[in-house]
Amino acid sequence: MKRRIHIDLLLNSEAAADKVLTLILDKIAILDTFDVLTSGKIYGMLNLLQGSSTQTRFNNPLDADILRDFVVGLWTTGALASKILARSRIALHTCSHDEINIQPCIEDNVLVK
Ligand SMILES: [Zn+2]
């Protein structure tokens, strides 16, 4: 079982999306990931670490919380907070997709700005 995080952020500009994506990827780079998928961004929406057929998971489940807290920090305080819009969403679940008996993905920690 691996801890998985799914981040969907709404940004008010493409420049803000680029900045947030860079910050998040820099943070991920220092965490203990099992696998990472970045599905990219479109204007006004940053889809990071998502995909129903792909998995983005952490070897250390605490690292998922660290990334969650980092993103909450971005949308709460600092220069980017006002650029990350309401309805931005972070969801976590414990993922069984690498197990023999795959269970449905059930989010157990969801934050919505
Ligand atoms: Zn899952």
Image (tube, rainbow, N blue to C red):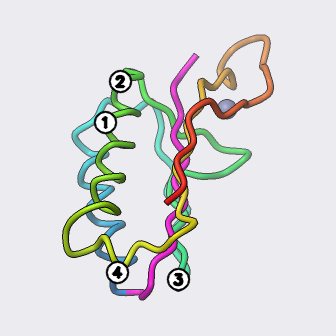
Q: Amino acid at mark 2?
A: Leu
| Numbered mark located on residue 44 in the image | 3
Cα distance between the residues tagged 3 and 1: 25 Å
Q: Regarding ligand 1, which quadrant of the image does it lie in?
A: top right
Which residue carries the number 1 mark?
Answer: 66
The magenta segment is 1-14
| SS for dot 3 | loop
Image marks 2 and 4: residues in contact by CB distance under 8 Å: no
Circle 1 Cα neighbour tier, 10 Å, few/some/many (<14 / 14–19 / ≥20): some
Question: At 69% across and 25% down in the image, what residue appears?
Answer: 97
Amino acid beneath label 3: Gly
Is the C-beta separation of discs 1 and 4 under 8 Å?
Answer: no
Measured as percent of width and height from the top left, residue 43 is found at 53, 85
Residue indicated by mark 4: 16
Cα–Cα gap, marks 2 and 4: 27 Å
Question: Which mark is first along the chain, 4 or 3?
Answer: 4
- Which one is in front, 24 or 107? 107
Q: Nearer the viewer, residue 82 or 61?
A: 82
Marks 1 and 2 close (CB-CB < 8 Å): yes
Residue 85 in percent (x, y) is at 47, 74
- Alpha carbon of mark 3 to alpha carbon of mark 4: how far? 9 Å
Residue 79: image location, x then y, percent: 20, 75
